[in-house]
Structures are given as C-alpha cells and as structure tokens.
Amino acid sequence: MNVLEESIRRRPSHTKIVATIGPACEGVDRLGELIAAGVDVFRINTAHGSRQEHERHLADVREASHRAGAPVAVLVDLAGPKIRLGELPDGAVHLVAGQRVRFVPGDATSTPGELVTSYTPLVGELRPGDRVVLADGLVALVVEVVAASSATCRIVQSGVVRSRQGVNLPGVKLSVPSMNERDCDNAAWAAGAGVDFVGLSFVRTAADIEQLKAILARHGSETQVVAKIEKPEAVENLDSIVAATDAIMVARGDLGVEIDIAEVPMVQKRIIRACHAASKPVIVATQMLDSMQHSRLPTRAEATDVANAILDGADACMLSGETAIGEFPREAVETMHRIALATESAAPNRPSVEGPIATGGQLNPITEATMLAAGQIAGRIGAKLIVVVSASGRSALSISRHRHRVPVLGISPSDASLRRMCLYWGVVPIAGAPAETSGKLLGWLVERGRDTGFLAPGDRIVLVTGTGAAASRHNAVVVHEIEGGQVKS
C-alpha cells in the first residue's frame, strides 16, 4: 500500500483525534494500533510519570509514526498550578455534610478533621464564604473562619476524598504563577526535543501564554502553544488569550468545577466560535467517552456529546483515561472515529465562519480568499482532491477553517509543518511527496492515485499555488483533470 492510499484510507473523517498515552497504550506496537485506528496527535501528560518515561513515549510515537508512514503530532501537557490534597490518614477520608474540617499547612496529616494541600499559601488566600471543591466536584465545602494558621470549612456536599486528589477554588484569586519550576523545565525539554505542541494548564491571561512562548523561543523551537481554558478568568479574557495562542483546548474537567456545570455547554460553543473567528484550531476534551475505560461501548449520552462537539465545530476531540488507563484504548479510538464519520456525513456543508477573516497577522487576506475559492471550485466541479503546498502549515490551516468537504492533502518540505497539520480539521498531511506546486508533484499524486484505483481518468484535482507575486505566496487555483494516461490543466 503506498503513502497516498494509506494516508487517505486511515483518515476518512475530517475531525482529528487526540489520544493520551499511558500504561494502556505504551510501546511502539500499541501506539501503531492507535494510529491505524485514527489517532492524529498523542498527548503526554507531565502531571504523571518521570522525564525518562516522557522521553520514551516521545521516541515511541516517532517510531510508530515512521512505521506507519504517516505524520503524527505530539502534545506535551504541562501540569500547571494544579492544587492537590496532601497525604490523608489511611489514604482517604469520608467527609459528611454538616461537619467541619480544617485546612492546615503541611504535606501530610494524621489528625482526623484536618486537610493539607500542595499549595502552601492556601490558608492565607482563603476568605469566609469562599467555596472549596474536591475530587473533581464530588465534594464541596464552604469557608467559615480563617485564622492565622488554619481555615475552618463546613462540608456542604458529602463524599470520599483521597490523597493527591484535586482541589478547586471557584472564584478565588490565587497568587500562584501559571508555570512553576517543573513546568518551565518540562517546557524547555519539549522545545529541545522538537515536540509539536505544548499545552498550558490553568491559563488566566494572555501574559501566561507569552511567558511560555518566551521559553520556547529561547530554545529556537517551532513548538506551538495550546492554551487550556479551565478557569473563569480565562473565559473572561477569552479573546486576548485566543489572539495570543496557537490553539485552544476546552478542558471541561476543571472548567466544569470552576464554573457552574450548567454553563459548560454554552461556554464550549462560545470558545469554539472565538477560535473559528481567529482561525485557531480548537480541541474539545474530558470525559468524551469516559465509560469506555471499562466498557467496549460508550453511553448514548457520550456518543451524542462527541457528535455535538463536532457539530459545534471542534477541530479535534480528545481521549484521556480512555486510552491512558482504560481497558479498551483501540476500541475507544475506533468509536470516536465512527461517530465523527456519522456526524460529518449529516453536518451542514458550509464554511465555519462567513465574512471577513480575522487573521491576527498570520495570513495574507489574498491567501485566505484563495483558500475559500479553492474549496468552492472543488465542490462545484466534483474534484477528488484539493492539494495545498505549505512551507509553514499556515495555508493548510487557512483552508481547514473553511470546512470544505473535499479531502485536502497537505504537502510540505518541513516534517514539523506536516505534524502540525495533524491538528487541522480535514487536512491529511502527506509525507514523502515532492514539496513543489509543479508537474512533478502532480505526477507523483496521479501515479500513486491511479496505481491504487483512488484516481481514474476524468477525476479532477484542485491545486492551490502561487504566481510568484510578492503580495501572497498562494494566489492561484489550478484545476487538473486526469485524461487517459495523461494529465491536463
């Protein structure tokens, strides 16, 4: 099977899939199975594991990608200032509504009725009336009294909490920086290792993103930033954050604890609309097929959730525990892929955003208009393929945001650019193709397409190219029709 056939065969859906690496899918062979099932981007979560493990996972992804003959991207997710409980007596405690507990300084406690956290200044930053949410929202407290070395809270929602579980403080303004020393070190490693994307957790302002970009720039890295929206401040500063970052993740886990869970669906839609307007890729994440950690089939509600994220306009959907620690990682990827195919076949065939495009200086408006026209022409003439040669990948991102239904092949001389295209809706990056908009590239495509029966006489290919004018490198659309053994333009 040649490169062209294999790439198109494994990527019939337009929506991309991000999968988290963990014990359930470690190793080159298992990762290769997930690539074959439809994974485009692998996520390395630095909140878990050692640097040695992260390096091994990165090397395994690169090897699995090489064996598959398909570009696959890597997203390194920084842990960020996640507050966690310290060590509790016997590892867990049952908190009962109406009772009271005290937060005290320290890393561990053996005293009943006391809790400790990883965030040393916590007691000093709490105020009476503040809410404290534990265990991903399952347990809730309200602060009643704050003293010099403790904060007394009343339990308002019962449940069991365990050592090292998360602590959320909705509405509390914390002094903790967006990146700690460990995050900075992981970001520097990711930049030096040629990682494609770095995810920044608990973003609050655009300044947080600029801090991370400065670290990446010091290493001369092409690594792009994915800002994770999971704090109320991030929602308030959404437009400036979207403008500053390269991509966005709707991180619904902590977001659904930090804001009213009833607001999450509409906030998700708002974030996606903002990303479309700015031509930035957007990932929807958390609990998408959560039940598949222990079941071969998702719930009906989960399948509907994935479909609605796609209808909202997500470029990618992410699997977390489903692939990292679940019992059925491959089945989870295959299920997400099938839901995407079924949803896309019934989705409206229209550009994601109409009217003038806010490029933020990334793309020339001539290029943007050319990409829109290329898809319209391809649809009108029933073209089999749209082909875009893009040195940086930005032109491929441009055509992606128009949501054309004709398969788009992304060609680039840069391996890093090809991997970035793995996050772009509807773009299939092709490795090994001649990176030039000439007869050589067209001949390469036609030869491989005809060898496998994918292309036949009468089929048309739309090629986005340039005339050499200084105003834009992509300012022309050329239609090629295959006729007999020849190609004509």
Image (cartoon, rainbow, N blue to C red):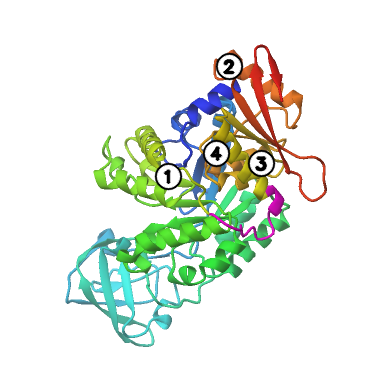
- Which circle, 2 or 4, is nearer the viewer? 2
Q: Which of marks 3 and 1 is nearer the N terminus?
A: 1
Q: Is residue 234 above or below residue 23?
A: below
Q: How far apart are marks 1 and 2 (CA)?
A: 28 Å
Give the side of residue 439 with respect to residue 482, left or right: right
Q: Residues within 10 Å of mark 4 (few under 14, many from 20)?
A: some
- State the residue position of label 2: 456
Residue 184 image point, x, y percent: 60, 60
Q: How far apart are marks 3 and 4 (CA)?
A: 19 Å
Mark 3 in CB contact with mark 2 (< 8 angstroms): no
Q: Earlier in the sequence, mark 2 or mark 4?
A: 4
Residue at 26% x, 47% y is 301
- Which circle, 3 or 2, is nearer the viewer? 2
Locate the N terminus by quadrant: top right
Mark 2 in CB contact with mark 4 (< 8 angstroms): no
Where on the picture, by quarter, is residue 389? top right
Q: Is residue 144 above or below residue 80?
A: below
- State the residue position of label 4: 56
- State the residue position of label 1: 348
- State the residue position of label 3: 416
Residue at 65% x, 49% y is 369
Q: In this view, does 357 lie above or below 429?
A: below
Give the structural element (helix, strand or loop) at label 1.
loop
Nearer the observer, 179 or 49:
179
- Residue range in magenta is 354-367
Give the structural element (helix, strand or loop) at label 4.
helix
Question: Which disc, if any, is residue 413?
Answer: none
